[in-house]
Amino acid sequence: MSAVVAEHDGHHDHSHDDHDHGPAKGWLRWIITTNHKDIGTLYLVFALAMFFVGGTMALVIRAELFEPGLQFVEPQFFNSMTTMHALVMVFGAVMPGFVGLANWMVPMMIGAPDMALPRMNNMSFWLLVAGVLLLASTLFMEGGAPASGWTLYPPLVLQTGKALPFAVFSVHLLGVSSIMGAINIIATIFNMRAPGMTLMKMPLFVWTWLITAFLLIAVMPVFAGAVTMLLTDRFFDTSFFNAAGGGDPVLYQHIFWFFGHPEVYIMILPTFGVASTIIPTFARKPLFGYSSMVYATAGIAFLSFIVWAHHMFTVGMPMAGELYFMYATMLIAIPTAVKIFNWTATMWKGSMTFETPMLFSIAFVALFTIGGFTGLMMAIAPSDFQYHDTYFIVAHFHYTLVPASIFMLMAAGYYWLPKWTGHMYNEKIGQLHFWLSAVSVNILFFPQHFLGLAGMPRRIPDYAVQFADWNMISSIGGFMFGFSQLLFLYIVVNTIKGGTGEKVTDEVWEDAHKHSLEWTLPSPPPYHSFTTPPTNIPTEHF
Amino acid sequence: MNDDVDSKNAKLVRRLVIIVVAMFGFGFALVPIYDVLCDITGLNGKVGSSAAKETVYPIDKSREMTVEFMTSLNETTPMVFRSETAKLKVHPGEYYRVNFYAENATDKTMIAQAIPSISPGLAAEFFKKTECFCFTEQTFKPRESKTMPVRFVIDPKLPPEYKTITLAYTFFDKTEKTHKN
């Protein structure tokens, strides 16, 4: 905690910003705002709310799976829960969480006064809210919410009741929202950087978001196209995926995963960016291998476009296809390993301290590696026939999403909350939250590897008694993890209200201003920051 | 924000929107691309919906392989549908005939179409059907049952590593769709 010094050390040369007009008065501020900090806050609050909504759905699933047999919910509703949990977490929590961070941090990190297209920024947030509300409304429709998994495979998804068109339009809205957000981020990074902030001087978080934004504009339209085809197959007698009319349901899987694989990297690349920001601060060293990190990120993004059919090894591809997708997938391990080694090298011989953001980051490096290795196992086509559609894949992608994306979103919260609010969070409760989360996330997901290897299929409400023990342990972990997150909610609210009462300095963390520009601003930063471009671009990486 | 940045932004946004529109189109372009690729490579085991030409092949008595017959119904198609033969030992080049039994389980006239699929997919082009109930839509009167033949031959050019070929039919109820049009 040495980074938090009690006295305010006179970085007040930025206070000339304060004469600008502040936020609009009253609650309407949050509806009409075009300020990147306000919109960032809206995104983050929305993401946190959806995290609890999606988490509640996950607890319905884990409660039903606590014991074999049907206890609490109907199988149809259970399948709606797996589908909605995934869609809410992906499109409502993780993606908006990172967009919120981008809104707050990208302009401050590159020395820009705001996002390039502030009105569009407001619109993309409110379209997101509309999209998620539309999605949530399907829960109350005749025939229930979509229950065919987040992949929405036909022909099963075409049997959805009244909800299908609403789910499709919801995907359209979410797509438009994230495409607009992505365009905004690209325009901001390309056109709004302070003089001297060259591309290769940008903090890695900005780099990862630039690449993520390109992934978004490349693949969200493809997904929008795929769900549009579902819609016309159902209502307008087309036969894109209907074999009776000359179509092919497997075609949907190709289109979906052409979107879907880049989509999973859309959720992980900003995660890498946050880790590359936090680890150097608490290791008190520059990030090891900055340029290799940039190239590795770009490499991962490129590879994400050419590996999609590894999600479909069991559909009956010919040998050549299986081999190509197997080798191409394994290639991804190389740039990913570059990143893992660079983070480790950054910590090597660093003067490390273990504040909450750093604890989450270290856990991320360790646990994401587990998720990466199980990914490699499934990349091997012949083994994948054993793992496909079992709990093994569930364990795999939850290891890459929960202790990775979710952990780093929380780490980012702990790391930047003092900057955003000007108040210090409660470090003791933060560390308690970390330890409870880190332990319970493993109790929750590690046993699912065993269940999968033993052959338990995913997306089922009931199972053979041989799977009972590990499911019970997994459910206990699930409830521990879920309720531990209430601590995070408490800490966030508490910090906004004043936190520990400790005054935080501009740089909050020791020497943080050497890493990135936002720490040269006051805490909290003025409503309009960098109205004149900064000249003190951090050069620590070079 | 000055005009210079504004015009740079506008230009960049235009370009990015073009990418978005192009990628939306690309999603739809994948449909014909997929069909062409499958046609060329035979990836998905789709077989032609028209009869193969009656050709006389040399019969390879030294080689014996298995052809399996599978039947299934799409979604809730109200039919009884089975093959009278589960599997058959065949010699490449020789013609065989198997019968399939289908029955309309409703009291209404039904129009149905059977869609064939061959596994492994790459063997599909060597599996020639000269006669099949799957070439056209089938109309069933209420409760009507039919015994429908398939006549086929395996091209002796089929690579020797194939020992078993599975022919699967799925019946689709097209009554509603046909009435709509």
Image: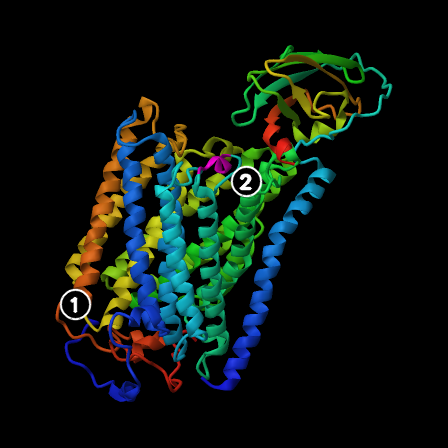
User: Is residue A425 something that shows in the picture?
Assistant: no
Q: Is residue B151 magenta?
A: no
Drawn side of residue B124 relative to residue A129, left or right = right
Whether labels 1 and 2 belong to a single chain: the reply is yes
Mark 1: few/some/many CA within 10 Å (<14, 14-19, 20+): few
Amino acid type at circle 2 is Arg
Q: Amino acid at mark 1?
A: Lys
What residue is disc 2 on?
A: A234
Q: Quadrant of residue A318?
A: top right
Name the residue tied to disc 1. A497
Residue beneath the point at 86% across and 21% down: B55
Where is residue B135 shown, x and y percent of the image? 73, 25
| Residue A77 visible in the displayed image | yes
Name the spot of residue A141 as percent of width and height, x first.
Answer: 38, 41
Report the span colored magenta: A156-161
Q: Chain letter for mark 1, please.
A: A
Which comes sooner in the sequence, label 1 or label 2?
A: 2
User: In percent of the image, x 33 and y 68: which residue is there?
Assistant: A31
Q: Residue furthest left?
A: A501
